[in-house]
Amino acid sequence: MPKKITIYDLAKMLSVSPATVSRSLNNHHSISDATKKRILDKANEVGYRTNKFAANLSNQKSNTIGVIVPRLNSYFMSTVLAGIEEVANEVGYNLIISQSLESEEKEKINAKTLLDSGVDALLVSLAHDSKDYQHFKNFTDRKIPLLFFDRVIDLPHCPTILIDNSSAGYEAGKHLIEQGCTNIIHISGNLKRTLYQDRFKGFKNALLEHNLEINEHTLIETDLDPKNIHAVIDFIKNSPKKIDGIFVASDNYAANCIKELKKVGIRVPEDIKVVGFNNDPVSEIISPNLTTISYPGHKMGVLAGESIIAHLKGSINLQSTNTILLRHQLITRESTHN
């Protein structure tokens, strides 16, 4: 491996002081344009690369924001990340993105790695099974801004960004009832996560408001992995009382439900109506097209990025903010209309 060129190497090559090289590379006003050009030309010629991290050590800033997400292969999460990156890059910040793969232990490792990397702030969407949040205390103790989005937890001085999941769940349940469904179930993610708790709470309120039965079968808690969908399909197929409506907390899982229901002779929407969540592209690809709740991922990412950068620049104090709610929208399609 070739030796990495340093400012000391450049100084020796050009018979100038290391301070002159450093100032020229940073476009300092005390250095003449001719000297700057000579040093920059030589730096380009020999392949010198600026160590931005080292350059920022003096002011304790890395101009880097850490992000931890459950999975990178999620359409929703990719739109959030695109929004964060768009805002961060505009003002000269870089992102270090890591995925927990739905594991609390991996989330802890990622958090430590990002802390050790000297990130200026951390944005987090929690893993499926996270229940111990001590790994974030290192950030709050050091007064490193910490913001949770989508899958959130209520920690002191840590703002959250999400939609009104309770209201969204209510709208999904109400829509199924308005389409004539009387025996509706909800297929949820891990109820340790508040967003899934709130979606079920809203859904349940819609059923109660319309005097529909709620029992132990109204909720099916899953990991929302389509690999494990057959137990859910068997439950629907073998239910003594015909299930005629499903609200699913994920478009991907809902689309797979539609596909598997058709295989066992259950028609959508004639026999059973289905509502998903997120408005992923799959909702328009699956046949019939899927009724869903639109969750503005890109807007969430933009808002998360703008909020954390405004805090870093001193424009706002995020630690005095609690929860920021974004608007959602029910999008009706073929899966709930005969």
Image: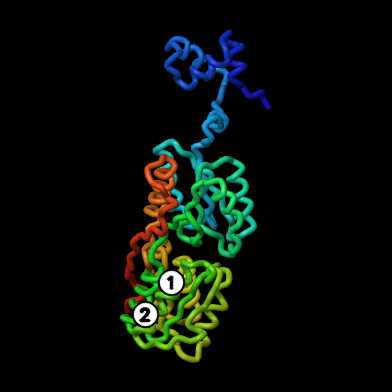
Q: Residue at x 43, y 42 (%)?
A: 88
Using the rendered image of the protein, determine whether residue 86 is visible from the camera's viewpoint: no
Choose the circle earlier in sequence order: 2 or 1: 1
From the top left corner, tell me how far across and down residue 291 is, in percent.
Answer: 36, 70
Which quadrant of the view contains residue 135?
bottom right
181 or 212, which is in the foreground?
A: 212
Identify which amino acid the numbered label 1 is placed on.
Answer: Arg
**Number of marks in picture:** 2
Q: Are marks 2 and 1 in contact (CB under 8 Å)?
A: no
Badge 1: residue crowd in 10 Å (few <14, some 14–19, many ≥20):
many
- According to the picture, the residue beneath numbered tag 2 turns out to be 206
Instruction: Say left or right for 165 vs 124.
Output: left
- State whether residue 243 is above or below residue 326: below
Residue 228's image quarter?
A: bottom right
Q: Residue at x 56, y 46 (%)?
A: 142
Along the line of sight, which residue is nearer the eye, 287 or 256? Answer: 256
Q: Which residue is mark 1?
A: 199
Judge from the rendering whether residue 305 lies leftward or rightward of residue 66; answer left or right. left
Q: Amino acid at mark 2?
A: Ala
